[in-house]
Amino acid sequence: MATTLMRNTAPREHPGRYYGFMAAVTVVAIVAAGFTALRAEAPEGGWFGVPFAFWLTAGLALVAEFRPTRWGGLWMSPIASIYLVYVLATMITWGFLPALVVQSCAIVLLSVQIGSAAWRTVFNVSQQGLALCASWFVWDAITGAAPWEGSALQLGAIFAAGAVWPIVSSTLVGYRQALRTGVPWHDLTWQWLKSEWALRATQVAIAPILATATMSSWWLVAASAIPIFSVYRILQTAADREREADHDPLTGLLNRKGFQEVVDGKLADAGETKTAVALLILDLDRFADVNSALGHEVGDQLLVELAKRFTTDIPRGKKIAHLGGDEFAFVWSELDGMTDPMECAREIRARLDAPIVLGDVSLEVDGSVGVAVFPDDGPDFQTLFRHADIAMYESKQRAGTYTRYGAEFDHHSPERLHLLGDLRRALDHPDAPGVNLFYQPQVRLVDGEVIGAEALLRYSHPERGVVNPAEIIETAEHSSVMRMLTERVVDIALRQLRTWRESGYDLRMAVNVSVRDLQSPEFTDFLTERIDAYGVNAKRFQLEITESALMADPRRVLQNVQRLSDLGVGISLDDFGTGFSSMQHLRRLPVTEIKIDKSFVTTLCDDQENAAIVSTTIDLGRALDVEVVAEGVEDEKVRRQLEGWGCHAGQGWHFAKPMNADAFERWMAEHRKR
């Protein structure tokens, strides 16, 4: 359904054709109306001698449009246009010209009620004027425009004339709409006629009754208004029920269905005018605790008070919905005055600052807001809503107040779901190609001896080629595929470690794993079984886990890490310095190695603060009796500085870039010669 704004504007692509068509309709309507009026005869007694019943009929036609019925059952126009009954009755009793005057006055009044632009009002008067001309010619052709007597012929003629009116009107409006949307005009016309036929048929059926009443006495006209306005009331009731279906009964705000209809309209406007629309979702924190501690009645009162707070002094055009439970949604567009989506989020948060007092209870309310903006974050309601929801959960995870959607938050986008499915298929079969490892050597700084290598994931997609490992991890870590991927990586790494041992290289292998792996006893059992199956020394195998992940839940990790430590497997704390490690956790966990993040190492010779962090971390590792490995060693100057501070080993492009297994063995052979 086109929105009010779109109806009052021309399409940006070809406004000339759009306005030209409407101008042509207006000119043709003026000529046709003039020709029809000349051909039609004046009523008996002249134009000024019509009885009071005519004026009553005309007056009722205008009264019918003082409160136009907006009903969603009409496909293209939400207005029921009750005046059609009176127009047809006037045409068959007093002639074409009085009917045209009554119809035009009713359309002007209706246009004022719904806020139509002047040119749109002129077009509607014109296109419905042409429809009335066509109806009169059908009536004249069948009956010779004889005075209404209620004969069977005249009854059939009014039904035929009444059918022509919506066909002509729908065709003209459908063609105009086709110029905007590109949809074939006949499809639009058919959709409109299909949605309105029952209403128009009812109006046409009542018109002969009203005509008979007007030819008898004016009080019968007044009496006949009862069934006509009964139709109006039925439509109004349907509209009220539609409104109830679109609103939340508790708060009176829009529900999700009504919210989607509003957003769809704003998106249509924004797409036409190239402006932005902000969609925001608010989720209250600890609302379940309120229901549990104080009862659902208090929880409902809280929601009602929040709805009042959100709807107080809001800008016109900003719409608010209660989605159910503890979720609210907001939509605001640039056309409504929105200039900064994040300012809208801050305004929502500000309304949560003051406590809500319910009787003797004062409640502190907090919540997280997710923001998605059309067109940058999505082209339609479903996409924007999902992205705002993702941003809201990201805000909760960050313990923040509001967050704008970012593609990196979306672990279930269609592209990632396809990637996840392809990755799963590659992992379903042990010998399937695609998943592989590259190896970067770790060098002891004091003598240049290669002591091990870090295994780095590589995935070659059949269509996309090599996929960024970070994207692979972000896609898989929220699904069961992560476990499959970790197990495949462990298998490849242990197999390679055995190959190196058979080739005479006594190296250790470091493999990155997620905290979810270390939290699972099943993974510990799997790793124990695979180490035994490959016959490698567990002390030559090392698991790397990021500092932030390990510190997220050290208690759950401790038991499994201790089992691995008892087996001999080493635990390396990766990206050290970027998280918030607790010295107590470092002391309790059997960490065997600390890896300093490359963001500190690469620039340590030029940045005194980074140098202080690196040297202090090396001292910490010495005090805790754990080895320290520096990542990101890119030149000899950094290597010498690290060696001087007593760093155990280094890793980086100064020594070698990541290589596949064959290239790594060739590099090892050359390195030994040097």
Image (cartoon, rainbow, N blue to C red):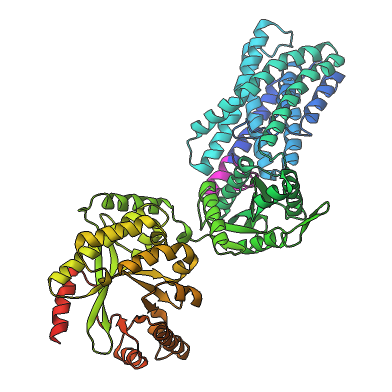
Residue found at the far top of this picture = 152
Q: Is residue 324 above or below residue 604?
A: above
Q: Is residue 97 visible?
A: no
Q: Is residue 245 visible?
A: yes
Comparing 163 with 645, the one in front is 645
Relative image position of residue 220 (x, y in whole percent): 84, 14
Quadrant of residue 392 within the rendered picture: bottom right
Give the magenta part as a residue range: 1-21
Quadrant of residue 313 within the rendered picture: bottom right
Residue found at the far front of this picture = 566
Relative image position of residue 417 (x, y in whole percent): 39, 51
Relative image position of residue 600 (x, y in whole percent): 42, 82
Q: Is residue 259 above or below residue 136?
A: below
- Count the numbered circles shown: 0
Comparing 377 with 538, the one in front is 538
Quadrant of residue 108 within the rendered picture: top right
Residue name at image x 71 percent, y 50 percent: 293
Comparing 590 with 35, the one in front is 590
Specify whether residue 19 is painted magenta.
Answer: yes
Q: On the picture, is 362 further left or further right than 509? A: right
Q: On the picture, is 88 further left or further right than 27? A: right
Quadrant occupied by the C terminus: bottom left
Relative image position of residue 140 (x, y in whole percent): 65, 16
Quadrant occupied by the N terminus: top right
Comparing 64 with 342, the one in front is 342
Q: On the picture, is 669 further left or further right than 395? A: left
Residue name at image x 22 percent, y 53 percent: 430
Specify whether residue 86 is painted magenta.
Answer: no
